[in-house]
Image (cartoon, grey):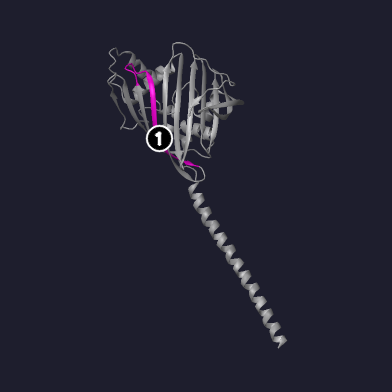
Amino acid sequence: MKLDLAIRKEQTSRSDILNSFFSSIRNVFCVAAIGLLAGSILSRNIKITSIDYGSIDSDSLEDDIEEIYNRYLKIDDNDYSTFSPSEMVNIATYKYQNEKYTYSDIVSTATSMGITQYIYGTTIKNDSDYFNESITESSFVKTAKRFYQNEDVVDIYNGKINHADGKIFATYDLEETFNIDSFVDKWGKDLRKPLIYTISSKTCLNTSSYTIDQNGNYLVSLDLDPIKSVSRYVKQMVEMSGLSSMPEFESIHLDFTLSNELDLLKMEVSENYYVWVVGKNYTKGSLTETFHILDDFKEIPDFESEIYYEE
């Protein structure tokens, strides 16, 4: 009797051990299967863009701006209807670029994954000296940079963002120095170019148009090719936001306000694109930049001086 009971206990013990072992095996295979599925989904979501921006020669896409500007100089009645919308913007940009003293300010937002990124910026030109500050902040990315450019080099300062009395500002330390060519290669353009987009007859879609408002200002509306027009811009986005790969644009719409003499006054941007940050994420961006032509120089702040922006 005792012997039969001992045998049954041993058999039960062996059965429990075997059941536990096979249960563990099943759990391992379930975890492995879930891991493979998650990995497959994740790899599809974080795939790098298939767009080869590096093969795009931005310079070759530009029109002959000097030739367009020379045609502009021959018009004396402020009737610029003979110019296409992209030519009007190129004339305004060329004029602005050749002014001695200029200043612009930027306010921008980009929303992705329910998170809104806020961007603030200032650009100053004093003859051959250029300055730009860009501050961008959200719960996900916080970046502040200053760029000081003269004829030979660009100094980049990396900043820490601060808040006080409803204003945002940054304090800086020196990060690195580039010559002009290496800076353009890394960031897409140097500070002499007012706009990061490539705007020309080759990059503007046929939906672009213009009207004239009651003050005689030219209101130019441009729809841009979402690949050809941003080959410089995507470099800047990667460097500024620390993206792992270049964004993929879906649409870009620009609205310009130009004076009755085609001076650059304002640019408003609406753009839609995808970024790869823990998956492929749809992003809606908007930006307003206001341009000012100055009669005298505007002091460029040194890296220890702060610029305050209303939040």
**One can see residue 35 in this view:** yes
Residue under the point 54% across and 32% down: 143
Question: What residue is disc 1 on?
Answer: 271
User: For the view shown, which residue lies furthest in the right direction?
Assistant: 2
Residue under the point 41% across and 36% down: 227
Residue under the point 58% across and 66% down: 26
**One can see residue 189 in this view:** no
Q: Quadrant of the rendered structure where residue 202 is? A: top left
Q: Quadrant of the rendered structure where residue 176 is? A: top right
Instruction: Tell me the crowding category of disc 1: few under 14, some 14 to 19, or many 20 or more residues within 10 angstroms, Cα based.
Output: some
User: For the view shown, which residue lies furthest in the bottom direction?
Assistant: 1
Give the main secondary structure of the magenta stretch: strand
What type is the residue that disc 1 sits on? Glu
Magenta stretch in the rendered image:
258-276
Residue under the point 45% across and 26% down: 106
The answer to if 237 sits in the magenta stretch is: no
Image location (x, y in percent) of residue 237 = 49, 33
**Above-or-below relation of 30 to 309:** below
The answer to if 274 sits in the magenta stretch is: yes
Label 1 SS: strand
Q: Quadrant of the N terminus?
A: bottom right
User: For the view shown, which residue lies furthest in the front direction?
Assistant: 165
Image location (x, y in percent) of residue 29 = 57, 63
- Taking depth in this image into account, of 149 and 267 the one nearest to the observer is 267
Q: Quadrant of the rendered structure where residue 211 is? A: top left
**Above-or-below relation of 139 to 72:** below
Image location (x, y in percent) of residue 140 = 53, 39
**Above-or-below relation of 21 to 194:** below
